[in-house]
Amino acid sequence: MGGDLREELLKAGLISKQQARKAAHSERVEKKRADPGSKAQQAQAARDEAARAQREQAQRDRTLAEARQAAARERDAQAQQRQRREMALRRAVQEGALPKWGGGRTYYFQDGTRVEALQLNDEAARRMEDGNAAVVRAGEARGSYALITSGAAAKLLDAAPDAIVCWHRR
């Protein structure tokens, strides 16, 4: 009961002083019971919310870790592929290199959008024209080319087709 209503009921004689005190006491006890319960409920809700947030953070961390691991695996696979390509190119150049191909005859070929030229002897130029030799990139440096046999170029075609710059296959 509210304080004003209790006083009015006392004045009107509908309740006694003892009943008014008992009602006030009951109100206080009820209020105290309600507050601790709501504090406990709030504390439990806070704990539940913290646990939920922790689970969500753990899930985000797992997802991020999986993404990082996938990216690392992808980088490793690309590095291995690049290494295999470079080894195949090196092996093709070592095994199939044409000896003494330099000479006085200029042989022009296209490397991407650039037109390049190599000085070849008559034998190397004839082999290039007949498709029995190929020009390959010998390294990362621009203008670094090697002349290899068509057999070595065929092997290189599987491992690193983009390394072959010019080959007149028949």
Image (cartoon, rainbow, N blue to C red):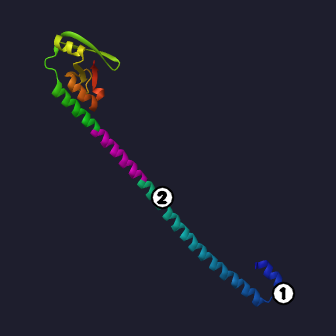
Which part of the image, by quadrant, shows the N terminus?
bottom right
Magenta residue span: 63-80
Is residue 5 or residue 38 the one in the foreground? 38
Give the CA separation, mark 2 to mark 1: 60 Å
Q: Which residue is mark 2?
A: 56
- Magenta segment, prevailing SS (helix, strand or loop): helix
Mark 1 neighbour density, 10 Å: few (under 14) some (14–19) many (20 or more):
few
- Can residue 164 be seen here? The reply is yes
Residue 57 sits above or below residue 128 on the image: below
> Splitting the image into 4 quarters, where does residue 9 fall?
bottom right
Q: Magenta includes 97?
A: no
Q: Is residue 65 left or right of residue 2?
A: left
Mark 2 neighbour density, 10 Å: few (under 14) some (14–19) many (20 or more):
few
- Which one is in front in this view, the residue at disc 2 or the one at disc 1? 2
| Image coords of residue 138 (percent x, y) | 22, 25
Q: Is residue 39 left or right of residue 138?
A: right
Residue 29 sits above or below residue 74 on the image: below
Amino acid at circle 1:
Leu
> Splitting the image into 4 quarters, where does residue 73 fall?
top left
Q: Residue at x 27, y 40 (%)?
A: 80
> Splitting the image into 4 quarters, where does residue 136 fall?
top left
Is residue 8 or residue 31 the one in the foreground? 31
Q: For numbered disc 2, what is the local secondary structure?
A: helix
Q: Which mark is residue 14?
A: 1
